[in-house]
Image (cartoon, rainbow, N blue to C red):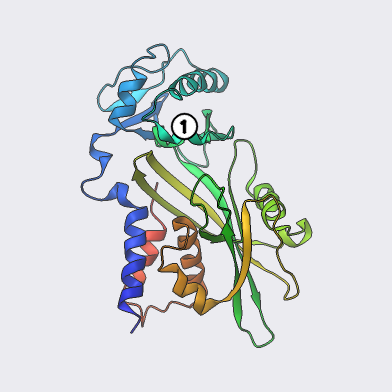
Amino acid sequence: MASCSWAENILQLLRKMNNFYLPGSCRSSCFRFEIEGAQVGWIPPHVASLLARYPDVFSPPHQGAVTLCHSLDSYEKRSEAVSYVVQALRQEPSLTCLKGWRDEKYSVMPRFSDCPLMWMERAATSLFGVKRYGVHINGYTVSDRQEVCMWLARRSHTKQTYPGLLDNMAAGGLAAGVGIKHTLVKECQEEACVPAAIAKRARPVATVSYTYEDEEGVFPESQFVFDLELPLEFKPRIGDGEVQEFYLLPIDKVKELLATDDFKPNSAMVVLDFLIRHSYIDPDTEPYYQDFVTGLHQIL
């Protein structure tokens, strides 16, 4: 039987990362964020009250929804109008997420397969609960004796989010207009100095999806997950300064670390998915196996 304390810590992680769906969350009081009749996010009440200052951009709440004004009838008009509002909201001390301004554009659309309706500054996305997408790479090695080890990164202490915590070897958000494979190669090169020729061998294997809320807003996120088997002689190197150190650890040690507070939460979920897919977690010995799988693959 699997360790109860380890499994309970993993369940706690999954509940935290899906707390928007739990009783007592802000979901019941949020307004749907709609563009041209399609829901693209969730707006918390305190944000909706601030948006009321901009009637030329946002219509007043009606039947549980806040909508963009119909006069904003193109990608460019919507993007520019909302950007103006978000820039103005940077003066609001209560909106702490905007202190982490990124100058990165994220696409806004109902589903990933839909055409984007606008772009939005990354730091503002949680105020509108719009879906955010990213790419995470599991870098691992297989020895001649078939022993699997995984490369983990220790985030820089200067990172805006989760400084100093363990992370996947490379990962990054999906910017507006940029492809998934392009983002994968770019992040591998920038963060871990993985040559493009090696990075391109990565295999798409899953998505990990979840929605959580915290004091900065609502975060519906989906990560495109890739597995990359690395040559035994290859060692990732620090690139753009977002990582302070890399570790090559046996898979049992990686599994142990998942249940600690030393791991960036969504990256821990990506590694948990790796452990399940590679049969390091077994449904005959782990009674919460199905709960783990469900918690990793929520519908946004």
- Position above or below: 147 against 9: below
Q: Quadrant of residue 202?
A: bottom right
Res. 40 in view: no
Q: Quadrant of residue 188?
A: bottom right
Q: Quadrant of residue 48?
A: top left
Name the residue at 42% across, 23% down. 36
Q: Residues within 10 Å of mark 1 (few under 14, many from 20)?
A: many
| Residue type highlighted by circle 1 | Leu
For this rendering, which residue is in front, 63 or 131?
131
Label 1, on which residue?
Answer: 98
Name the residue at 37% across, 12% down. 55
For this rendering, which residue is in front, 264 or 282?
264
Res. 193 in view: yes
- Position above or below: 29 against 223: above
Q: Relative to residue 200, is residue 113 drawn left or right?
A: left
Q: Position of residue 220 (x, y in %)?
A: 41, 44
> Furthest-left residue in view?
24
Q: Relative to residue 97, is residue 188 drawn left or right?
A: right
